Image (cartoon, rainbow, N blue to C red):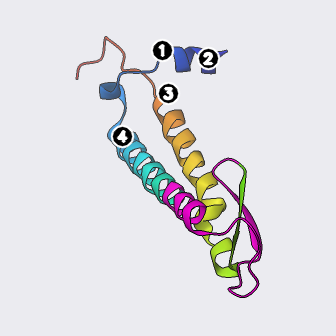
Amino acid sequence: MWLRKAIENPPAISDVPLWRKVLIVFLTAFFVFIGAASVDKQFTIYGSAPDHPVPATGQIYEVNVMHGNIRYVTLEEKESPLLGRAGSWAGAAFVAAIFLWITSRKKSADKPN
């Protein structure tokens, strides 16, 4: 139940220790950068790759882009880290940043600043 209360009433960002602020900014920047690169890669494949296999060009490997649209790419493009694992890492970075923020203790009122 404490996690629900922490989510509903997160501490003010001024109450978060400096090391957590730095880590939160880094994780959020990582999330934005990798997320944008992954979306750009999917848009590129969606717009340029054929929707049927083309053995002459080596585009025979099936990938799901843009929420389930099937496109065929080369093996090198299929194994690109931006098509799979990087998106998971971006999501994990975002969750970690939120967790670091909401689990930070609030400064007590009786302590001098």
Name the residue carrying label 2. 4
**Which quadrant of the figure contains the C terminus?**
top left
Q: Depth check: 71 or 103 in front?
A: 71
Compared to residue 66, the image places residue 110 above or below, namely above
Element assignment for label 4: helix
Mark 1 or mark 3, earlier in chain: 1
Marks 3/2 in contact by CB < 8 Å: the verdict is no
Marks 4/2 in contact by CB < 8 Å: the verdict is no
Task: Return the mark for residue 102.
Answer: 3
Give the residue type that dot 3 points to.
Ile
Mark 4 or mark 3, earlier in chain: 4
Compared to residue 113, the image places residue 18 above or below, namely below
Question: In the rendering, at what x and y percent does residue 5 appear?
Answer: 57, 14
Give the residue type that dot 4 points to.
Lys
Give the residue type that dot 2 points to.
Arg
**Residue 96, quarter of the rendered image:** top right
Mark 3 or mark 2, earlier in chain: 2
Q: CA distance from mark 1 to mark 3?
A: 8 Å
Element assignment for label 2: helix
Identify the residue at the far left of this view.
Answer: 113
Relative horizontal placement of residue 6, taking residue 1 as reference (left or right): left
Name the residue carrying label 4. 21
Question: In the rendering, at what x and y percent does residue 56 appear?
Answer: 72, 88
**Which quadrant of the figure contains the N terminus?**
top right
Name the residue carrying label 1. 9
Compared to residue 62, the image places residue 67 above or below, namely above
Q: Residues within 10 Å of mark 1 (few under 14, many from 20)?
A: few
Q: Residues within 10 Å of mark 4 (few under 14, many from 20)?
A: some
The residue shown at (63%, 75%) is 77
